[in-house]
Amino acid sequence: MASPRPPLADRFPDFPWDLLAPAKARASAHPGGLVDLSMGTPVDPVPAVVQAALASASNAPGYPLTQGTPAFRDAVAEWLHAEAAVSAAVTPAVLPTIGLKEAVASLATLLGLGPGDAVVVPELAYPTYEVGAISVGAQVIRSDDVAAWADDDSVGLVWVNSPANPTGRVLSAEHLRTVVAAARRIGAVVASDECYLDLWWQGQRPPSVLATDVCGDDITGVLALHSLSKRSNLAGYRVGSISGDPELVSQLLAARKHLGLIVPAPNLAAAAAAYRDRESVDAQRERYRRRRDVLMPALAAAGFRVDHSEAALFIWATAGEDCWASVDRLADIGLLVAPGAFYGPAGGEHVRIALTASDSAVASAAQRLLTLN
């Protein structure tokens, strides 16, 4: 008799945040208490207009549709044209997702990839891109260099992430054009994780992969993934979206129907209101900017150099030492941060510091940082 196959979980690495538990216990023992800057979990209020939309749609006894509501899809499409600079001649298809992580983790599966295929992920990357590839038995190519995969016809999916987690790096429209062109030559899908598109600190809004400057009027083979968790404090609502090539989105919709991947109707109503609520997004961005302005000089005074970090929700910093040594030193003063090694070997001397803490907690963190030197 053949031995049973090992469970899928055995293919995955250790869950990163479990490895941070000892540092969290150490930081929590600080007399001033824990200041958790490790995860991008929003702490600010959900906008009132969004809460009102959720309440008004709460009488929803029937099953919602996998494709979501016309109001939600229209709100996303309007946002893409008005804020993400998508050509007026293009009509991206829109599909709601249950937050964004499940969409990232399942995309390789839903695209039909498997052993013999390859998935490209950034050199420093959100771990779930790799998890999605591992789950289907695909090879992972970890590289920011298009030349590393541009002639490899085993590549079925290319992930880009701009503004990036963990680094805050922004990819130019020129670079995104190069990625799209190379992927099209080998028949690969480009998936751009843009959940921080509304959060930038230098220059202009980062370009979307669907923008006219990148795709012109042709979005064939291109998908953009967006989230309301960070920009609108809706992490608890679990609503994201996949937008782009109508043929690809139609294929994803067909698969998601079978799998029962459905966003609750009240959440979709709230999300539609959030997409149309520009004022609260601008206010939230300014909250994060103020917190960043408090932490940046304190990190410099504590001997840290900040790299990239021109956008997104994090500060990517190094003291020129092993990342776990930095985690431990910061835990000693009650600060919990994420080690750069969570995001790839190239992060071995960096830590990721989230801006998702209250103003008072951030002020406390800055004061504690000044005690390191």
Image (cartoon, rainbow, N blue to C red):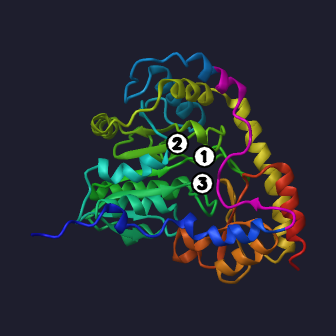
**Which is nearer the eye, 286 or 352?**
352
The tag earlier along the polypeptide, 1 or 2, is: 1
> What's the distance in space between the residues labelled 1 and 3, CA to CA?
6 Å
Q: Secondary structure at mark 2?
A: strand
Measured along the vertical axis of the image, is residue 10 above or below residue 231?
below
Measured along the vertical axis of the image, is residue 370 above or below residue 100?
below
Q: Position of residue 250 (x, y in %)?
A: 30, 35
Q: Is residue 358 left or right of residue 345?
A: right
Task: Give the residue at x 27% y 54%.
Answer: 187
Q: What amino acid does circle 1 point to?
A: Leu
Identify residue for label 3.
163
> What's the distance in space between the residues labelled 2 and 3, CA to CA?
12 Å
Measured along the vertical axis of the image, is residue 67 above or below residue 353?
above
Q: Position of residue 6 (x, y in %)?
A: 27, 67
In magenta, the rendered stretch is: 31-52
- The numbered dot on residue 242 is none
* Pointer 1 with pointer 3, Cβ within 8 A: yes
Identify residue for label 2.
226
Neighbours of disc 3 within 10 Å: few (<14), some (14-19), many (20+): many
| Residue 47 among magenta residues | yes
Quadrant in the picture for residue 247: top left
Identify residue for label 1.
197
